[in-house]
Amino acid sequence: MKWITRISKALLITFVLLSILVYLALKSSLPEITGQITVNSQESVTIDRDINGLATLKSNSRLGIAYGLGFTHAQERFFQMDLLRKNSAGELSQLFGPVAINHDSKIRLHQFRKKAHQNITLLPVEHQRILEEYTKGVNEGLKQLKLRPFEYLLLNKTPHRWLPEDSFLVLFSMYIDLQYQFGEREQLLGLLKNNLMPDVYDFLNPDGSMWDAPIDNSTFSSPDLPIHSFSVVPILQTIESSTLVTATNNLHEELPGSNSWAVGGDLTAYGAAMLANDMHLGINMPNIWFRAAFKYQTQVQSIEIDGVTLPGTPAMIVGSNRNIAWGFTNSYGDWNDLITLKVNN
């Protein structure tokens, strides 16, 4: 029985030691939340956190805010940012190996990293500087961590430095999440058009309706109810009905439903308008958004903005600047086309 007792004690000690090591590793990868950090930047910024962890960034310029936001994002969300950039660039196999090669091979068809690099040159100079400061902040925030984020410890990988083009790759990942990156919607519409009577197809895929409110004040009339049934056209009756059922059985079509609702100031108790914005993204851990507040000076006024940011980018995606509030919803516009290419053998 003594050897059983000794083995039990040894296992218990080993477990305690491992728990201490895991705790120290996780603690070392946490962000700096107190004190002062000296970095190689011309812009100074103060980062305060309230009891709920909401970060308030204060600086004398927008560039300082960009640097501080990059620093904060990297300290708290770098792995999330890394996944987003690698997802659209087709580089997930750098982290996960062969299991991600199929995804990478498909997504590289779009050459998103090349497009991201090209898009930087199209930005106004002022925006390029904001992106550059944000990038510097990200890399400094990553550098200031005592230990790389724990996800990299689990994967036995080393995180790569952030590049300005990576912020565009994050946006491209959002596009991938909100749209059909491989033309599935175009394929579905083509199948419907080829198999349904024209009036049925027009009813299912109208140009718009009375509920649309384009900014150019154009209007749409609601489509007429179709005369024909939703069955396939007579000439194609030999096609199995399951073909259409399978094509339309897509959760991407059924579940999402972003929305925004605005209430005029004459209907509120305090005389200001209200905006309710629900982006209906999936529930992830961590949350895709990062709450933050900006306070900085311009040459003519003080700016205060509250809302949510997207880790990997320097902008306030949804929020309020005390004068206006803005939201974000997604629209299934006709953003792409499928073209059959004829290639030479």
Image: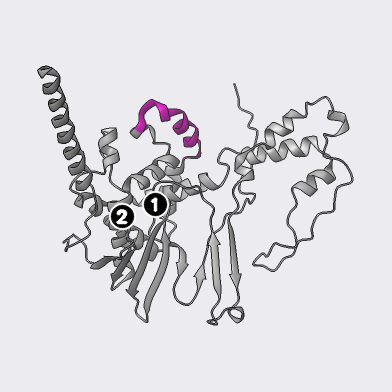
Q: CA distance from mark 1 to mark 2?
A: 8 Å
Nearer to us in this view, 127 or 158: 158
Residue 162: x and y in percent read 31, 48
Q: Position of residue 118 (x, y in %)?
A: 43, 50
What numbered label is drawn on residue 326? none
Identify the secondary structure beneath mark 2: helix
Mark 1 vs 2: CB contact within 8 A: yes
Please state the horizontal and vertical placement of residue 199, each as a whole percent of the image. 84, 46
User: Which residue lies at the image location 40% right of the left edge and 70% below the top edge?
Assistant: 305
Indicate yes or no whether the magenta region holds residue 103. yes
Nearer to the camera, 336 or 323: 323
Q: Which amino acid type is marked by label 1? A: Ser
The C terminus: image quadrant: top right
- The residue at which mark 2 appears reads as 135
Based on the picture, tell me whether residue 325 belongs to the magenta stretch.
no
- Given residues 282 and 87, the one toward you in this image is 282
Q: Secondary structure at mark 1?
A: helix
Q: Nearer the viewer, residue 211 or 272?
A: 272
Q: Is residue 309 left or right of residue 24?
A: right
Q: Which residues are magenta?
A: 96-111
Crowding near pointer 2: few (<14 within 10 Å), some, many (20+)? many
Residue type marked 2: Thr
Horizontal side of residue 343 vs 56, given as left or right = right
Question: Among all residues in the image, which is located at the extreme front?
Answer: 1
- Residue 55: x and y, percent? 32, 63
Magenta span: chief secondary structure: helix
* Above/below status of 67 relative to 83: below
Q: Measuring 33% from the left and 44% from the top, which residue is drawn there?
A: 79
Does residue 242 sit above or below 264 in this rendering?
Answer: above
Residue annotated with mark 1: 167
Using the rendered view, name the quadrant where residue 114 is placed: top left
N-term mark: 1 or 2: 2
